[in-house]
Image: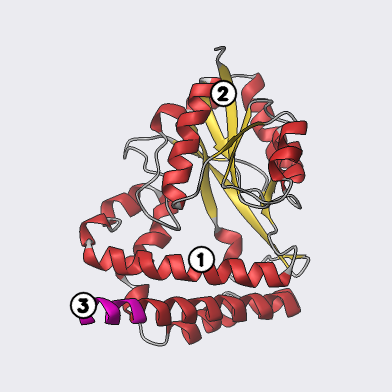
């Protein structure tokens, strides 16, 4: 097995509409790409294989387990110094590609352990510039020996040692997963179910919550800390979520797309609340 400076992995499930765009974006920075597929019934793996990706099929159990499995497989297949991961409905902007490419060429990638990518959300065919979404930075490029995800079923985060060095990259990681509203709503309804289960599990195991020291050192954990220690204790969260996005974070400046996204986020918060309350009630009745 030959080693490579940078390899990528993508976890997939019925992503034939998105996978080519994602892989073609990654091919501009690396040819070492692994696709870990969760028993897709469409042409996801066929398309990925034709583009040169190494495809493996493994039944999905939860997000953290699947991501950790993909990291292990990526290291076994490519022996990379660094790993970058994208979701199938994401791709790299030209500026982000150029930044990563230049760091690979001048060998400055090795100056840091973890790189944060600036997320740009596209919704209703519009790039959201307000609503708080413009401030999201994700830890998606990391030194391979440091990468491992927490044991959480959804919204899992990368566990990195407290002394890891961080760097923010230029450009955007662009996300657009609303190729079909029926599929989009169904998918996020499923996410709210997983989030409700994770919330109940976290209440049963408070030691797994993000600590204040972790949040202070790792910027991408600050929102998680606020959610776990402040947000989840507030009443009327769906209404607060809408007001926070649409008014306080100026989501209204994104027009119809901003209104719909704020409403959608409030709906998903309500679904999570009701499902978690139902799960807690069932637990008490046992």
Q: Label 2's element?
A: loop
256 or 193: which is nearer to us? Answer: 193
- 88 on left or right of 132: right
* Relative image position of residue 140 (x, y in whole percent): 53, 42
Q: Which residue is mark 1?
A: 191
Residue 240 on image: x %, y % = 47, 83
Whole-angstrom CA distance, mark 1 to mark 3, is: 25 Å
Based on the displayed image, in which of its 4 quarters is residue 33 positioned? Answer: top right
Disc on res. 108: 2
Question: Between 255 and 199, which is closer to the camera in this rendering?
Answer: 199
Q: Is the magenta region chiefly helix, strand or loop?
A: helix
**Residue 93 in sight from this viewpoint:** no
Evaluate if marks 3 and 2 touch, with contact meaning CB atoms under 8 Å apart: no
- Kindly report which numbered mark, 1 or 3, lies closer to the viewer in this rendering: 3
Residue 96 vs 90, above or below: the answer is above
Q: Which element type, helix, strand or loop, lies under badge 3?
A: loop
Q: Which mark is residue 237?
A: none
Please tell me in which quadrant of the rendered image residue 164 appears.
Answer: top left
- Disc on res. 286: 3
244 or 19, nearer to the observer:
19
Crowding near the residue tagged with mark 2, few <14, some 14–19, many ≥20 C-alpha atoms within 10 Å: few
């Amino acid at each position: 097995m030959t080693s490579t400076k940078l390899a990528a992995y993508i976890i997939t499930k019925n992503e034939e509409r998105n996978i080519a765009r994602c892989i073609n974006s990654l091919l501009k920075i690396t040819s070492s790409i692994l696709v870990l597929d969760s028993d897709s019934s469409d042409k996801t793996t066929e398309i990925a294989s034709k583009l040169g990706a190494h495809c493996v099929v493994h039944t999905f159990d939860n997000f953290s387990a699947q991501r950790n499995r993909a990291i292990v497989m990526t290291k076994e297949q490519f022996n990379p110094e660094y790993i970058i991961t994208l979701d199938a409905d994401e791709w790299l902007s030209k500026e982000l590609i150029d930044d990563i490419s230049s760091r690979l060429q001048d060998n400055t990638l090795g100056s840091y352990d973890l790189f944060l990518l600036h997320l740009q959300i596209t919704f209703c065919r519009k790039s959201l510039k307000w609503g708080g979404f413009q401030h999201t930075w994700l830890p998606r490029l990391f030194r391979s020996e440091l990468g491992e995800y927490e044991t959480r079923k959804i919204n899992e985060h990368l566990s990195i040692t407290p002394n890891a060095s961080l760097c923010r990259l230029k450009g955007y990681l662009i996300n657009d997963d609303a190729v079909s509203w029926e599929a989009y709503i169904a998918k996020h309804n499923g996410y709210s179910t997983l989030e409700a289960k994770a919330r109940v599990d976290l209440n049963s195991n408070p030691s797994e919550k993000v600590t204040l020291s972790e949040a202070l050192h790792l910027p991408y954990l600050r929102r998680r800390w606020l959610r776990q220690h402040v947000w989840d204790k507030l009443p009327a969260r769906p209404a607060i979520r809408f007001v926070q996005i649409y008014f306080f974070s100026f989501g209204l400046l994104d027009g119809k797309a901003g209104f719909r996204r704020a409403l959608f986020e409030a709906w998903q918060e309500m679904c999570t609340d009701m499902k978690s309350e139902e799960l807690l009630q069932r637990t008490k009745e046992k």
